Amino acid sequence: MILSTAKGERLMQPRFGCGIHDVVFSPNNPAVITVVVDSIRKALINDEPRIDVLNVDAETNEQQQNLLVIRINYRVRSNNTIENLVYPYYITEGR
């Protein structure tokens, strides 16, 4: 939910969400990947108190130049379980 919500989308919670929507039409390069990873890390730390973010990593796919695969490793605080989430994110969807 956090990754799918753009910042400012919720009227009563304007800081909730992630800034990855701001770069959807940007080129798929290391600078944009750094912005995406940083935005995800900050959003999860600020908006999801039930987890500890262990690592956020992103990589591109040679076959699909507009695909950015984001891996999030986290620990659930209530039971100390380590999990991960793979989030496919398409940059330059309009092309």
Image (cartoon, rainbow, N blue to C red):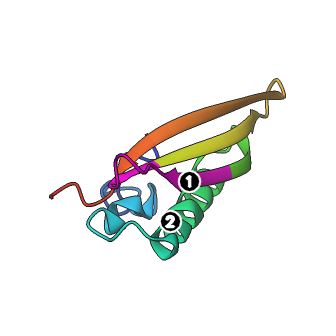
Determine the residue positioned at 53% across, 47% down.
70
Residue under numbered circle 1: 58
Q: Nearer the viewer, residue 69 or 23?
A: 69
Mark 1 neighbour class, 10 Å CA radius: few under 14, some 14 to 19, many 20 or more: some
Mark 1, secondary structure of its residue: strand
Check residue 95 for magenta coloring.
Answer: no
Q: CA distance from mark 1 to mark 2?
A: 7 Å
Outermost residue, right side = 80
Name the kind of residue labelled 1 in the image.
Ala
Where 14 sits versus 93, above or below? below
Q: Which mark is residue 33?
A: 2
Residue 46 falls left or right of residue 1: right
N-term-proximal mark, 1 vs 2:
2
Check residue 65 for magenta coloring.
Answer: yes
Q: Where does residue 76 sit, x and y in percent of width and height?
A: 74, 32
- The quarter in which the C terminus is drawn is bottom left
Which region shows up in magenta? Answer: 56-68
Outermost residue, front side = 63
- The quarter in which the N terminus is drawn is top left
Determine the residue positioned at 45% across, 57% down.
18
Mark 2, secondary structure of its residue: helix
Q: Residue 65: name its quadrant.
A: bottom left
Name the kind of residue labelled 2 in the image.
Ile
Q: Circles 1 and 2: CB distance less than 8 Å?
A: yes
Q: Which mark is residue 17?
A: none
Where 31 sits versus 78, above or below? below
Mark 2 neighbour class, 10 Å CA radius: few under 14, some 14 to 19, many 20 or more: many
